[in-house]
Amino acid sequence: MSRSQILVLVAALAIVVVLFFLPKVVVNEEDKESFTKTDTAIPEGHSEDDGHNHGAETANAGNAHMTASPEQLLELATVRARYNKASDDQTRSRVATELAAAYTTVSKFDSAGYYYELAANARPGEKSYKQAGDSYFEAFTYAPSQGRASELGAKARAMYEQVLKNNPSDLDSKTNIAMTYIATENPMQGITLLREVITADPNNQKALFNLGLLSMQSNQFDKAEERFRKLVSVNPEHVEGTFYLAVSLARTGKKEEAVTYFNKVKGLSNDPALAASVDEYLAELK
């Protein structure tokens, strides 16, 4: 599977776009030697129109004002004005949460994370830190550059670490932390965390999926097949898992089984972009 095909499919399915930034890590248990280090770029900066300098918008969020409805933009402007006029910390904290939700509505996830973080710091709690972490992580997955991914990943980790202090069993937060580490100079830390999640929950779909993707990224299609086969056994209707299982089978020479799973994908999803990708692979397997 070519890099361009992976990126096209990821865009079509809105899954882990951050794959573009991943190093070619080896995820075998036995091989933990040197990894390809990623370049560190100076993060892009941008002054938000609310007066706070909290980073550049993500690729997805950058077009928010062009794609948001007039009603959404009016709501955002209204809540932002209320936030700016708030005269006490309690009111600002409450309105910060509303403002974060308004930014989420128009897909400005880094801005949403910023205000959720303000609210969480004012009134600490597992839920508030999780909201901030999820927003930063969403922005991380759409980051337009390696430097921006690194910056947003660090912000997401900081919020999720607060979540884990209160709830060490939150495997979703732990999995997301792991994926942010994959895009750093220490990807093995992320691999280790994903394995810890699998140890705690062998059927964890998110961890299985991400480990499978990482195996594909390092061209370990036999390992990818193992992960995606397990995932599909846990959730037979997992569209992306089924697709990548088919790709892994094709790359390991199991063409007949690959065809079976590619055809299954077409029955699981009506996405025309995905169907086109499946048809392309089926044509190659004939």
Image (cartoon, rainbow, N blue to C red):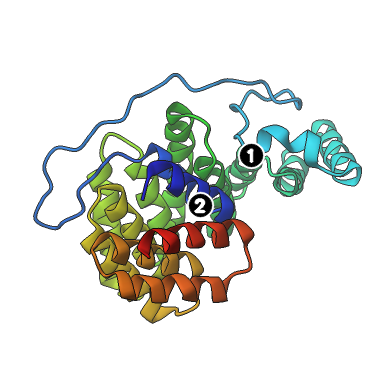
Image marks 2 and 1: residues in contact by CB distance under 8 Å: no
Q: Residue at x 23, y 63 (%)?
A: 252
**Residue at numbered disc 1:** 60
Tell me which amino acid carries mark 1.
Asn
Residue indicated by mark 2: 9
Query: How many marks overall?
Result: 2
Q: Which residue lies at the image location 13% right of the left edge and 47% below the top edge? A: 32
The disc labelled 2 sits on which kind of residue?
Answer: Leu
Comparing 217 with 165, the one in front is: 217
Q: Is residue 107 visible?
A: yes
Q: Which element type, helix, strand or loop, lies under badge 2?
A: helix
Q: Is residue 201 visible?
A: no
Residue 234 location, x and y as percent? 39, 80
Residue 200's place in the image compared with 10, above or below, is below
- Residue at the spot x=28%, y=62% of the render? 224
Query: Is residue 12 toward the left or the right of residue 227 in the image?
Result: right
